[in-house]
Image (tube, rainbow, N blue to C red):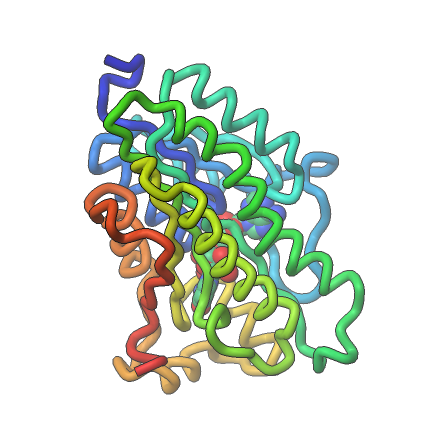
Amino acid sequence: MSPSGGQGVAVVTGAARGMGAAVARRLAARGLTVALVDVPAEPPGRVAEVPGPYRPANGTDLDEATARCGGRGEAWAADVRDAAALGRVVDAVVERHGRLDVAVAAAGAVAGGAPSWETSDEVWSAMLGVNLTGVFHLARATVPHLLDAPLPRRGRFVAVASAAAHHGLPRMAAYSAAKHGVAGLVKALAAELGATGVTANAVAPGSTATPMLEASAALYGIDDPSVFAGQARIERLIDPDEVAATIEWLGLDAPDALTGAVVDVDGGFRA
Ligand SMILES: NC(=O)c1ccc[n+]([C@@H]2O[C@H](COP(=O)([O-])OP(=O)(O)OC[C@H]3O[C@@H](n4cnc5c(N)ncnc54)[C@H](O)[C@@H]3O)[C@@H](O)[C@H]2O)c1
């Protein structure tokens, strides 16, 4: 039996609010110990703000999300762009609890607003850095621990991509490129992990009611993000808990045969 009582251990990035917080709450409710990782409240650990209106969570958000895990949550600070910091957090979690079962890469940020040929280096590197390299950093830090589990293994890596992993969003080329990259990364991971019992999948949400959607609207000069509801067949915004329910299922219930998939949670956007 592990020091965590055999119920499992999860690491969730971007867990201070939005989808990541909802995932953490759900995994904790299923009995897992959950390490909630989000961007440090202050520099130097906080690598940089992304250009434009998007603002990441603060320390209060992380504390509140951790409290909502009802004693099974632990707050950790790391910017996913900082591979060493993220690796230290993951190693410390495994050292403390003796195992890792589920890794969820939900941290993300949005920037853009200009056509791709006018996109600045700052926007390009922020979008690739948080949304793609951040997922790679989590995979590099966690997959060796998922593979360390005793046989029969049941490790799960789940990344949050986006409908922008299938579609090119105008004036969000860097974000779209990064999210397409997330789909490629999880497919390659799945191909590499093969029959190990560790799977790698992504979810691709459509417009979901979180602070990120407000920042996305602002990039288009739109005040009310609910206008994005018109893009979904369900004619409403998606609730972050609906995405979290899908991630919970991928993380705890889905069979080994489901690997290398990008699962749409987009209200029928692609239908
Ligand atoms: N909201 C949408 O409509 C939508 C649609 C498709 C995909 N997504 C994706 O869903 C994921 C979750 O986003 P959300 O909608 O819940 O937004 P959100 O802004 O509420 O949550 C994102 C979380 O990631 C954290 N984060 C940002 N940069 C970070 C960094 N460098 N290091 C560590 N943590 C960082 C933020 O502090 C925040 O807690 C993101 O990957 C996003 O790209 C969102």
* Residue 64 in picture, x, y percent from top left: 41, 39
Q: Residue 113: which quarter of the image?
A: bottom right
Tell which of 53 and 271 is nearer to you. 271
Q: Is residue 6 at all visible to an observer of this figure?
A: yes
The vertical placement of 266 against 244, above or below, is below
The vertical placement of 250 against 182, above or below, is above
* Residue 199 in picture, x, y percent from top left: 34, 44
Q: Residue 269: which quarter of the image?
A: bottom left
* Residue 66 in picture, x, y percent from top left: 39, 35
Tell which of 230 and 144 is nearer to you. 144
The vertical placement of 177 against 27, above or below, is below
Tell which of 128 and 111 is nearer to you. 128
Q: Horizontally, is 256 left or right of 162 in the view?
A: left
Q: Horizontally, is 160 left or right of 263 in the view?
A: right
Q: Is residue 24 at all visible to an observer of this figure?
A: no
Quadrant that contains the C terminus: bottom left
- Residue found at x 49% / y 78%: 167
- Residue found at x 47% / y 33%: 142
Tell which of 18 and 178 is nearer to you. 178
Quadrant that contains the N terminus: top left
- Residue found at x 33% / y 52%: 259
- Residue found at x 34% / y 74%: 237
* Residue 36 in picture, x, y percent from top left: 44, 36
Q: Horizontally, is 108 left or right of 251 in the view?
A: right
Q: Horizontally, is 85 left or right of 20 in the view?
A: right
